[in-house]
Amino acid sequence: MSNIGKQSIDIPDGVDIDLNKNIINVKGSLGELSLEFNSKMSIDFTDNKISVNRPSDEKKYKEFHGLYRALIQNMVTGVTQGFSKELSLVGVGYTAEKQGTFLVINAGYSHPVYMQVPEAITIDVPSTTSVIVKGVDKQNVGDVAAKIREIRKPEPYKGKGIRYVDEYVKRKAGKTVGAGAG
């Protein structure tokens, strides 16, 4: 049995679970999320605990077992606490600012890059070199953060670019001048 899948999910106070046939809706203080799961999988909600069960030991059901348990856990965490990713802009003149529903990033190009902020995501810019992406859905938060990072990925020679705060960029040594070329 899946080590992740066999664990039950504790539901905190203030979270409403609505379970219809093969759709689960989770509603909390920060928002609402829904998930459509395989109809052969069974999800039980009793005594503020959710457990995911599989019909047989076939490979695909073993895969779904841990997957759906993790997705439901992320939904519960998202509607209660939310998710966030912090990015850092490293480089001379690399700045970010929020203008209405757009994030404007200057990352060494001849023009600023405008990025539309999705509806379910909030972006904070506490300083000109820091961007915080927040939201209820873990996948959307990671996707938006990855798109921001993709504007200018960190390069290995000087370390300039947009990176996650906890990301380590492995540095390379540059070229050296030859001593006796002649």
Image (cartoon, rainbow, N blue to C red):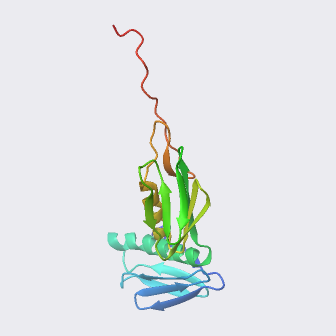
Q: Is residue 110 left or right of residue 136?
A: left
**Quarter holding the C terminus?**
top left
Furthest residue toward right: 13
Residue 163 higher or lower than 116, as above or below: above
Total numbered badges shown on the rendered structure: 0
Furthest residue toward front: 110
Residue 23 higher or lower than 57, as above or below: below
Residue 54: name its quadrant: bottom left
Q: Is residue 58 visible?
A: no
Q: In terms of depth relative to the viewer, which is nearer, 32 or 153?
A: 153
Q: Position of residue 85 (x, y in %)?
A: 55, 62
Residue 68: name its quadrant: bottom left
Q: Is residue 107 visible?
A: yes
What residue do we see at 46% from left, 46% from top?
154
Q: Position of residue 45 (x, y in %)?
A: 54, 87
What residue do we see at 64% from left, 81% from top?
12
Q: Position of residue 115 (x, y in %)?
A: 44, 65
Q: Is residue 150 left or right of residue 163?
A: left
**Quarter holding the N terminus?**
bottom left
